[in-house]
Amino acid sequence: MSRADAIVVGAGISGLTAAWRLARAGKRVKVLEANQRVGGRTLNHRFSSGDVVEVGGQWVGPTQERILALLDELGLETFPLWNQGDNLTLFGGKLKPYRGTIPRFAPHVLLDVLQAQLRLDRLARQIPLDDPGRHPRAAEWDRMSFAEWTRRTLKTAHGRQVMELVSGAVFAAAPHELSFLHVLFYIRSGTDLDTLLGVRNGAQQDRIVGGSQRISEELAARLGDAMQLGQPVRALRQDATGVELVTDSGSHRAERVILAMPPTMLLRIAQEPLLPGWRDQLLQRLPQGSVIKCMALYNSPFWRDRGLSGQVTSERGPVRLTFDNSLPGSSRGVLMGFIEGDEARQWSAVPVDERRAAVLECFARYFGDAALRPLEYVDKCWADEPFARGCYAALFPPGLWSGGAARLREPCGRLHFAGTETATRWMGYFDGAVEAGERAACEVLQRLA
Amino acid sequence: MSRADAIVVGAGISGLTAAWRLARAGKRVKVLEANQRVGGRTLNHRFSSGDVVEVGGQWVGPTQERILALLDELGLETFPLWNQGDNLTLFGGKLKPYRGTIPRFAPHVLLDVLQAQLRLDRLARQIPLDDPGRHPRAAEWDRMSFAEWTRRTLKTAHGRQVMELVSGAVFAAAPHELSFLHVLFYIRSGTDLDTLLGVRNGAQQDRIVGGSQRISEELAARLGDAMQLGQPVRALRQDATGVELVTDSGSHRAERVILAMPPTMLLRIAQEPLLPGWRDQLLQRLPQGSVIKCMALYNSPFWRDRGLSGQVTSERGPVRLTFDNSLPGSSRGVLMGFIEGDEARQWSAVPVDERRAAVLECFARYFGDAALRPLEYVDKCWADEPFARGCYAALFPPGLWSGGAARLREPCGRLHFAGTETATRWMGYFDGAVEAGERAACEVLQRLA
C-alpha cells in the first residue's frame, strides 16, 4: 500500500489546484484520477485541420480573479471569443439581428425582461455567499422554483421564454429544476446577470490559448509522478490514523483526502464509515445539469461575410444557443451550439448521425445552407461521461440551501471537499473550481501542520 | 463463479416476490442481499416485553389486492390499527379533538381544504398510470411543484399548512420537493386522497401479525439456499451471453438480472457498459424521502382511558403525526410518531438521547406527561440505512415524468427493474413492490423461455 500526506481524488481544475498547492507547501501528495486523462469537465478536441477547440468548459472572464491568477502562474494566455457583427435571435417565428446581450424585443417584452433582470440583480446582491440559507427570506425564496418566480413576475409569455433560455444557457437546466434562492445565489456568485450572460465584460469573454484542458495538463505536469490516471476510487475507509482508498489495482493511504468531483459522484464511492444520513440525502438532491456541446468545422467563418457574429438565441431547438468558436490565426470557421436540459437527455439517446443532422439543420436555420456542409463535426454528451454524468455543474433544487447545503463544504472526518460546487464565488465556473481547490488545500495544510 | 438463470439484487418485498415467482416457474434463481437481513424498507423491532413493532413500513389496506393476495399465499394474517376514540389536532396553537380523517377546522378553512381535496381527486382520476407524462396537460402540471399549486389554489394559510402535513405524511417530503403531476399520479396510484390518508378503508387500515418484515422472511424461507445475505453488489458487467455481478466475496453470473432497490442505489453499482446518460440523469433526480419513525412502549395505552385514539396531526414538530401502535393481546401501549423531510435530516444528526427527549416531549404535548416515562424507546433514521438511504420511497421532482421517467421501468439490456418506484398501482407501498416484482419476473420469464 502506498502512502502520502494527502490524496486528491479527481484531476479536474479544482483537484489539481488543491494538489499543486499542497505539493508546493512541501507535502507528499498524490492525485488519483478515474479517467485516462486529466481535465474533468474540460476536454480539448483537435480537428484534423489542427484547430483545437473545447468540447467542455472553455471560458474565463473579468472578476474571475482566481482562475486568471492561475493562468498567469501557469504561463497560459487568453484570447477573446469572436464577438463582432450582428447577433441573431429567433423568437415569434422570426429571425432578427441585434447587438449586445438583449435582443431588440417589442417594447412591452423588453420592459418585462429588463424589470426582471433588475429585480434579480437587486435581490441577488443581498445573498450571503458563504451560506444563502442565512438570508432572512431564504426559506421563502428556497421553497419557490425559478419557474414559479418567473410565472409570478414576468407579465409576457415572451419574457418568460427569455428566462427559460437564460436558465438553459447558465445552468443547462429548466427553470423548474432550480430553487429561486439558488438562482439569486448564482447571480451574486458570478457578480450580476450581465456578467453571467455577457461576452464582452462577461463570463464568455475570453478563451485559453491551446484550449482550456491545458490548465489541468500544466498543473499535472508540475505534479509529475504524483499523478495517477485510470484509477477510479471504488471504496474509502477512514480510521483513527488515516484514510484508505481502494482502486481496481490496489490501495492507497493518506492522512487526509480531498474529494474533487461532482456531488453525484461522491455517492458512488462506497464509504466506511457511511456518510452521515443528512449528507447523503442532500447529495441525492444535487443532480448534474445536462448539456451536449456541438461543433462544426467549416472551410471559413462564412457567416462573418454577412456581418454576423455567430451568436444566436432561439426559441427552437435542439440548438438554442450558438457562438463563433473559430480560432485566431486559422482560416477555418467553427460554429458551436448547445443542446440543454431535457433536450440534451433526449438527443443523447439518438444515434450521432441523426444528432449531427439536427444540429446542422439548426445552424442552417440561423446561418444559411452553407452550414449543412461542414468539414468535420464533433459533439459531446456530458451525461455519458462516466465520471461526470452531466455538465456544467450540479443544480440546487428548492429546499437545498435552506436545508443546510452550505455544510456540504465542511470536512467530514478526514475527508475534504473541493469541486466548483463547493465554491462561494463563481460556483459552477473554473474560478469556483480554483477557489474550492485552494480552500480544501488550506484546510488540509492546517490539519497536517 | 456461480451461475443462475436469473439473479435478483435486493431482498425487499419486491425482489423476493420476483425471485419467488421465478423459482416457482422452475428457474434457477439467486437473491443477493446487501444487508445481513431481508426486508428492505420493512424491519421488525422486538421490545423486551416481547411486543413486535415495525420501524419501517407497516400498513396494508383495501384495494391493495396484490399484497393482500401475497399475504394470503404466505399464510400471514392482518389486524386493524387501533382506531377508536378521538383524534387530536394541534393547529393555531390549540389542541382539539376530532373524528375521521379531517379535523374540525373553522368553516372557511374546511371549505378551502375540501375544495383542494376534490380538485386533486378530480385531476388525479385523469392521469394515465402507466405514464403520467402522456396526459395532455402533463408538461404544465409537471413544471409546477406541489408547493406552487398549493399557493395558487388554497386561499387560507391554515389550508396550505394542512397540505404540507399531507405532503409529509404521504411522501416524507415537503411540497416544494414534489412535482404536482407526481402528486396527482400518486393519488390515482393509491385510488384517491381519502384512501391514501385514511385509517378505516384507507392505506393505514391494517397491520400484519408478527410484523411486516414477516412477508420477506416467509418469502426468503421458501427460497431456501437461493438466498444470500451480506452480499452488496459492487459492480455489474453485461456481455453477449449474460451478466456478471461482483460482490466483495466473489462473482455471480446469470442470463438476466433484476435490480430491486431504491433508484438512488442503482447509481452506486459500477456498471459496464455504463447506464445510458438519460437514465443516469433521471436517476440522479430521484432522491429518497426522509423519515425517522419513533416508538415508545408504555405500561399501558393510557391515552385510551381519556377516550383518545392516539392519532395526532400537528403544526409543531419534530413529531407532527402519531398513531397508536399497540398490539392486540398485549397489555402494553405503543405510541408511534413520524419525523419527516427536513426535520428528519436535522434530527438524524442529533444524538439519540436528545432525539428521544424531543420526541417524548411531543408525545407529552399531545397525551400528557405520562408520555415522558416510557418503558422503552426506539427510533429509526432511514437516511442512515446503508442500502436504502431514505424512506418511504423516491420523490419525483418537477420535470421527471414529462422527461420520460416512465421509461425507467423498461429493461436495459439484460437488466430488469423492480422496486416499488417502478410500479403503476400503489407506487411507494408494499402493493406497488409486489406489482413491480411480478412484472419484472414476467419480463425475465418471457426472455428465458
Image: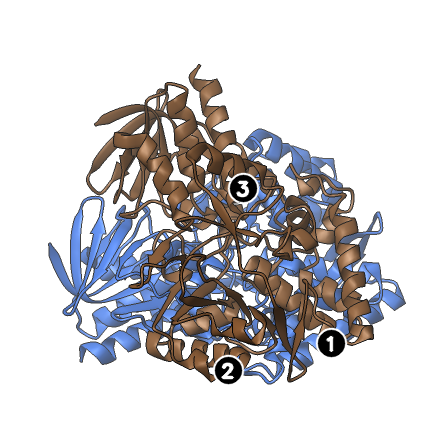
Chain colours: A brown, B blue
Secondary structure, mark 2, is loop
Based on the displayed image, in which of its 4 quarters is residue B191 positioned?
bottom right
Question: Which of label 2 and label 3 is nearer to you?
Answer: 2
Disc 1 sits on a residue from what chain? A
Q: Are marks 1 and 3 on the same chain?
A: yes
- Asked whether the viewer can see residue A12, the reply is yes
- Residue at figure coordinates x 58%, y 33% from the top left: B350
Callout 2, which amino acid?
Gly
- Residue B116: quarter of image: bottom right
Residue identifier under label 1: A157
Residue nearest the observer in this picture, A232 or B293: A232
SS at mark 3 in the image = helix
Quadrant (top left/top right/bottom left/bottom right) for the N terminus of chain B: bottom left
Type of amino acid at the residue the image marks with label 3: Asp
Q: Which mark is residue A368?
A: 2
Q: Nearer the viewer, residue A297 or A25?
A: A297
Label 2 or label 1, whichever lies nearer to me, is 2
Q: Is residue A395 left or right of residue A43?
A: right
Q: Is residue B131 visible?
A: no
Q: Mark 3 highlights which residue? A: A431
Q: Nearer the viewer, residue B366 or A317?
A: A317
Distance Cα–Cα, label 2 vs label 1: 28 Å
Residue beneath the point at 31% across and 49% down? B34
| Tag 2 and tag 3 share a subunit | yes
Q: Are marks 2 and 1 on the same chain?
A: yes
Tell me where residue A104 appears, x and y as whole percent.
Answer: 73, 72
Chain where mark 2 sits:
A
Q: Amino acid at mark 1?
A: Ala
Callout 1: SS: helix
> Is A166 left, or right, of B239 in this rendering?
right
